[in-house]
Image (tube, coloured by chain):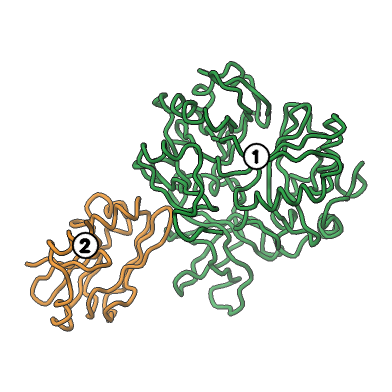
Chain colours: A orange, B green
Amino acid sequence: MTTLYTSDHEWLRIEGDVATIGITDYAQTQLGDVVFVELPKVGRTLKKAEAAAVVESVKAASDVYAPISGEVLEVNDALAAEPALVNSDAAGKAWFFKMKIADKNELGGLMDEAAYKAHTA
Amino acid sequence: MLARDQSELKRTPLHALHLARGGKMVPFAGYEMPVQYPAGVLKEHLHTRSHAGLFDVSHMGQIALRPKSGKVADAALALERLVPQDIVGIAPGRQRYAQFTNQDGGILDDLMAANFGDHLFLVVNAACKAEDEAHLRKHLSDACDIDSLEGRALIALQGPKAESALAKICADAASMKFMDAGPRRVGDFDCFVSRSGYTGEDGFEISVPAAQAEALVTRLLDNPDVLPIGLGARDSLRLEAGLCLYGHDIDTTTTPVEAALEWSVQKSRRKDGARAGGFPGADKILGQFEHGAPRRRVGLKAQGRAPVREGAPLFADSTSGEAIGKVTSGGFGPSLNAPVAMGYLPTSLSRIGTTVFAEVRGQRLPLAVAATPFVPNTYKR
């Protein structure tokens, strides 16, 4: 299992040909108290960099972009009932959605943990 | 209105204090202001409603109108040339909400006007203050000296614990009623205090000489009931209170009648009143009082959880093509734990309970026209 990061502050946990996607702890700190999360429909095919989800704080709405291309396999319905999970456990319980990885080559452009830490330093 | 980089931004006398308390600074109306502190918008909002919040509003304009005749009534009569409010009728030690109107009946700015006995004291919006001052000089210089009080800070202390917090250092605080205003001794300082604010809570606004602002604020923040609050929570608090934000809910294209601010126009300035009309746009505004306005500002409550934000177009039903209005303020109301918004609708669709639809990310979300304030106000009348 590998965890990769985007410059837009998303994380991807890679297990076989499935990627679980969420936003980083750094991102949730920047957003502040999350009050609403909108997730993509299961079965939707996302293109890399397409707006896939929306996360809203009291202040503002922010798009979450698909970090890679692929079909949405599952979404985290717990976030609808408890959006504050994004603040309390961004890297764990507050995963957003799972995708079937369409093209493993797209993973090459992502950062590992050390590179992401340098990116947010 | 936003300066291009932080170096062009002005700072308030409380800038260092904001930084010391971890304020996240953002550009706002030409100033570098705290949008939030480490507690965050949600906690700051809730703390203001349950205890007390302290806001730096020093970016707002403070202006003294001093009558050349020495009689405050002459300054009041002069100001009535520019606003549809009864200014003459403001008793000494009282203040009133007002609007500067333009020839089309639109709103140039909204303001507070207080009678300080020998002069009037005005508080205007930061983004409009230069234009407001020029407007006053152009139209009132025959009757008044217009004195921009640049050397003063302005703070708001709001919430159910505001009275007890201020009473520790201001003997008169507890005896003041909503919209009382005037010079008061606060601690060792000569301040102007009004029992008012813009959160829907009981509270005070305190004008203090800039050099003493930090000492006063530090003293108030020594009280564990009082937390510093940023612009983020100031906005969510005023939205829940159903209060207009200039440049968003009201502007040069909205009249006081369209903005549902009829309550702020006293009988003496309406048709058949003692001083009817005589302000810019009077024909249009008084005509709307008699015959109604084509559109109206309303409160909107979402039926779902998704916040509906400023700019979202409004539709009569879930499929029609033509927008009938738009959202002018919207977000999440922490005290309601639900989304809230305000916007303009055709008057025929402005009745409470009417369902309309906002378009958000391509979807039509149902909203119900709702009474404001969304959260009951707690003014001490």
Residue B94 falls in image quadrant: top right
Question: Local crowd at mark 2 within 10 Å, few (<14), some, or many (≥20)?
Answer: few
Q: Quadrant of the C terminus of chain B?
A: top right
Please tell me the numbered disc located at residue B62.
Answer: 1
- Label 1, secondary structure: give it: strand
Which of these two is toward me, B184 or B288? Answer: B184
The residue type indicated by label 2 comes to His
> Front-most of A3 and B326?
A3
Image quarter where the N terminus of chain B lies is bottom right
Gap in angstroms between the C-alphas marked 2 and 1: 44 Å
Q: Position of residue B279 (x, y in %)?
A: 84, 51
What residue sits right under mark 2 in the picture?
A: A119
Residue A52 quadrant? bottom left
Q: Amino acid at mark 1?
A: Gln
Q: Residue at x 27, y 55 (%)?
A: A86
The chain under label 2 reads A
Q: Secondary structure at mark 2?
A: helix
Which of these two is toward me, A9 or B18?
B18
Q: Position of residue B310 (x, y in %)?
A: 53, 62
Residue at left 55%, top 57%?
B329
Measured from the top left, where is residue B248 in percent x and y? 60, 58
**B67 over B132 or under it: above or below:** above
Q: Residue furthest front?
A: B7
Chain holding disc 1: B
At x 17%, y 72%, the residue is A110
The picture quadrant where one finds residue B353 is: bottom right
Q: Are tags 2 and 1 found on a single chain?
A: no
The circle drawn on residue A34 is: none
Q: Is residue A5 above or below residue B232?
A: below
Residue B368 left/right relative to B39: right
